[in-house]
Image (cartoon, grey):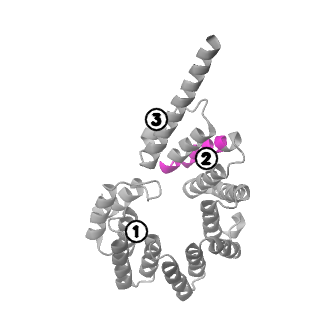
Amino acid sequence: MRQLAVLAFVCASLVAGSSKYDHALRLYNHTEYQASLKLLLPPQHKSPAELALIGQNYFMLDDAKRATEFFQKAVAAEPNNSAYYHWLGRAYGRWAETGSMFTAMGHASKARQSFEKAIELDPGNSEAVNDLFEFYVEAPGFVGGGLDKADKIADRIAERDAAEGSYAHARIAEKRKEFNTAEQHLRRAMELAPRQVGRVIDLAKFLAKQGRFKESDETFVAADKLSPDTPKVMYARAATYIKSGRNIEEARMLLEKYLASALTPDDPSRADARKLLQQVSGG
């Protein structure tokens, strides 16, 4: 009887732990990061999945240092998990962007190494491939970046997803200031994925950067028609207006609407939206 009682207690504990994790994950997916953390902390005796979710919450709260610490623990507990290495790379990358200039180079190198490890463990981890591509495009050569490397990754992306591959080639062309070629690739991406609103947003943002504001605005209208009241369209349109110093009142209204929307972790953060709103509100 004692053994059965112990077994029942262990099973109940596992179910309770799983239930708590599932609840924390739901909160995370609804961008309730502080509430999710509250369920998961303190961090003692956590599973690798719980450690990683704690890291994701800290990452979304812009605490790259703490996020890195928990992804390191998750990787140490489960060293063959591609997703954990991918998140570790993201955390190191964010830390490189926001931390001290004296540590940025080291953190950037660790970001690249983590992305590469994630892909080594799972070549099908498309998000890790995309993030490694962005690293190669944006990072200087002395930390492992480079457009020649990005070219190879872009070809690899195109084999998996033709539209995403066209976007990747557009990014490289734009970086090389080959703007006509970049536009052709962006338009090709739209043709290949006509129902993906992100492809329309990409073109609208590019046109605005080229000073082609009328075309950009028309493209944003097309994006809104394709996917009405989509938060990512609101945010991109507002951010583009603010960056070009146009339609400021409309940008403010779009940001207020965005902040009132149901967001996911894939959308720009509310903190970023509030910063933009502060810019146009004079606060």
> Would you say the residues marked 1 and 3 are in contact, meaning their CB atoms lie under 8 Å apart?
no
In the rendering, at what x and y percent does residue 251 appear? 31, 68
Q: Secondary structure at mark 2?
A: helix
Using the numbered discs, state the Cα–Cα distance from disc 3 to disc 2 in whole angstroms. 18 Å
**What residue is pinned by disc 3?**
38
**What residue is pinned by disc 2?**
68
The stretch drawn in magenta includes residue 62: yes
- Examine the residues drawn in magenta and state their main secondary structure: helix
- Three-letter amino acid code at the position of disc 1: Ala
In the rendering, at what x and y percent does residue 182 appear? 54, 83
Camera-side mark, 3 or 2: 3
| Residue in the image at 32% along x and 65% along y | 229
- Three-letter amino acid code at the position of disc 2: Thr
Residue at the far top in the pictured view = 1
Q: Secondary structure at mark 1?
A: helix
Q: Quadrant of residue 228?
A: bottom left
Using the numbered discs, state the Cα–Cα distance from disc 2 to disc 1 in whole angstroms. 28 Å
Q: Can you tell which mark lies on residue 236?
A: 1
| Residue in the image at 35% along x and 68% along y | 238
The magenta region covers 59-74
The stretch drawn in magenta includes residue 195: no
* Left or right side of 121 for 68: left
* Left or right side of 156 for 262: left
Nearest the eye: 189 or 116: 189
Nearest the eye: 105 or 16: 16
> Would you say the residues marked 3 and 2 are in contact, meaning their CB atoms lie under 8 Å apart?
no
In the rendering, at what x and y percent does residue 102 appear? 64, 55
Q: Quadrant of residue 185?
A: bottom right
Whether residue 100 appears in this view of the structure is no
